[in-house]
Image (spheres, rainbow, N blue to C red):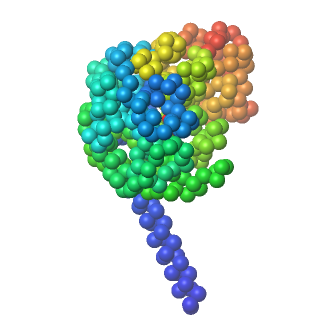
């Protein structure tokens, strides 16, 4: 009897825990506007990531303060000569449109702690601390509205400048001049800034958080426990309350946390984790996905970075991301004068040109039913599957059996029929007669 009572007790205890876990996982119910925004985002497929801050002056990426252990008082000299007089929001947004991108995600404040917008919570911002004196986010927000491009703000959780970012995280530990302060003050500071970002720039696309991982224990090989409470419930709650349509994503490299609306994958296709610190495949959520990648090898402007990706590599990445049902957020690091490197502008134009003639097969699509390989990738819209042939040397494609009821298969551009067979031995396509494009040849599979 005693044993049965004990068992019942354990069962009640377990179900209470399970219930509260389920409850907290379900706490957040996205508003209707939010669900619409998610749909828009999922279909948008392509955006521009912009890493721009006072670090661009040093031409050594956005981590330069940490990498060169620049003392706080030395780093603070940078704003005094940050004067991007050639920043032309109209030119930026027109470039984005021509590239076929639908949104921009720009760093409002990076790990160096410098705010690229007018903030009442600090004087360490572009309006108060630079000779330029203008709020670049405001100018960009206005131009985006004019040209119908959505604007998202990247916001760093991690800060190498402020005393109240304490306890300190894993990074920036050798930067001279860092003080101590109260974590609760830091959370309060972030809330004021986020309120500013969500009230002073009209309706925004969303907030892109980064730096969560800084507060995780690290033994040199793997991450351990989180040292702090980021107060996500309050921060996310605040954002959703101020602008329900604004989408929240967090580059924490783990599964979706309650309150988040999209999930990002840094320098990796969803589930790939080639970086070693990326999101594991079993952590992919059921929210819209976004992959971010650099146009060269750096996020912030890096003068000596010569790893510019070819047009083909960039377009392939966009296609592959779409094949995984994901957006691609392609990054440029503007120069200190506010211009984007001509080489990068040329690449963006080339992608835009490609997209203009292959639009159907990317925008508005979902992950396709044919599993992606290095040679081909599929996307789908309604009853049409787009098979992107990335390897122009392919003549016969033989894949395992795919449960598709196929009506016909044609080339997207020429609309010529493609011979195929689909039976228990798999799907076989004969594309030997097809004129292949060196970048991508799109085949349209109509389903019954
Ligand atoms: C990393 C870096 C950061 C960059 C971001 C973009 O988290 O810390 O510099 O902003 O990736 O994905």
The x and y percentages for residue 391 are: 68, 19
For this view, does 374 lie left or right of residue 252? right
Looking at the rendering, in which quadrant would you find the C terminus?
top right
Q: Residue, x 47% and y 25% (percent of image)?
A: 56
Looking at the rendering, in which quadrant would you find the N terminus?
bottom right
Q: Residue, x 71% and y 12% (percent of image)?
A: 432
Q: Is residue 114 visible?
A: yes
Relative to 413, does residue 76 appear above or below in the rendering?
below
For this view, does 207 lie left or right of residue 220? left
Relative to 379, does residue 164 appear above or below in the rendering?
below
Q: Residue, x 48% and y 69% (percent of image)?
A: 17
Could you say which quadrant of the image residue 146 lies in?
top left
Q: Residue, x 40% and y 19% (percent of image)?
A: 338
The x and y percentages for residue 111 are: 46, 39
The x and y percentages for residue 364 are: 45, 27
Front residue of this view, candidates 444 and 23: 23
Question: How many numbered dots are placed on residues in this image?
Answer: 0
Front residue of this view, candidates 112 and 316: 112
Q: Is residue 367 visible?
A: no
The x and y percentages for residue 138 are: 29, 28
For this view, does 30 lie left or right of residue 226? left
């Amino acid at each position: 009897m005693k044993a049965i009572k004990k068992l019942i007790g354990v069962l009640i205890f377990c179900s209470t825990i399970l219930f509260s876990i389920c409850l907290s996982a379900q706490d957040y119910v996205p508003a209707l506007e939010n669900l619409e925004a998610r749909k828009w985002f999922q279909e948008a497929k392509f955006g521009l990531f912009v890493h721009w801050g006072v670090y661009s002056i040093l031409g050594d990426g956005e981590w330069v303060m940490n990498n060169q252990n620049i003392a706080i008082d030395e780093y603070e000299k940078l704003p005094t000569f940050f004067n991007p007089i050639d920043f032309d929001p109209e030119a930026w947004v027109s470039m984005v449109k021509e590239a076929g991108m639908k949104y921009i995600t720009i760093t409002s404040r990076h790990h160096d702690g410098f705010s690229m917008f007018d903030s009442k919570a600090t004087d360490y911002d572009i309006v108060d601390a630079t000779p330029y004196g203008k709020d670049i986010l405001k100018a960009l927000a206005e131009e985006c509205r004019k040209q119908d491009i959505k604007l998202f703000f990247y916001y760093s959780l991690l800060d190498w400048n402020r005393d109240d970012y304490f306890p300190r995280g894993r990074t920036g530990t050798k930067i001279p001049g860092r003080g101590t302060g109260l974590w609760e003050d830091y959370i309060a500071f972030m809330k004021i800034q986020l309120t500013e970002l969500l009230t002073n720039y009209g309706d925004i696309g969303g907030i892109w958080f980064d730096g969560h991982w800084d507060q995780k224990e690290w033994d040199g090989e793997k991450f351990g426990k989180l040292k702090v409470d980021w107060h996500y419930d309050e921060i996310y709650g605040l954002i959703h309350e101020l602008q329900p349509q604004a989408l929240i994503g967090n580059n924490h490299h783990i599964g979706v946390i309650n309150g988040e609306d999209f999930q990002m994958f840094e320098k990796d296709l969803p589930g790939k984790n080639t970086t070693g610190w990326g999101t594991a495949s079993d952590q992919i959520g059921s929210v819209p996905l976004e992959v971010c990648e650099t146009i060269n090898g750096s996020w912030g402007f890096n003068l000596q970075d010569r790893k510019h990706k070819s047009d083909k590599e960039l377009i392939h990445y966009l296609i592959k991301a779409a094949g995984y049902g994901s957006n691609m957020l392609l990054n440029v690091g503007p120069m200190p004068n506010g211009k984007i490197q001509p080489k990068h502008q040329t690449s963006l134009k080339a992608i835009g040109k490609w997209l203009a003639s292959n639009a159907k097969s990317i925008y508005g699509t979902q992950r396709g039913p044919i599993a992606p390989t290095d040679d081909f990738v599929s996307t789908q819209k309604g009853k049409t599957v787009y098979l992107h042939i990335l390897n122009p040397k392919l003549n016969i494609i033989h894949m395992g059996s795919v449960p598709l009821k196929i009506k016909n298969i044609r080339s997207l551009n020429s609309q010529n029929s493609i011979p195929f067979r689909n039976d228990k031995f798999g799907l076989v396509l004969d594309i030997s007669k097809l004129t292949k494009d060196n970048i991508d040849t799109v085949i349209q599979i109509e389903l019954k």
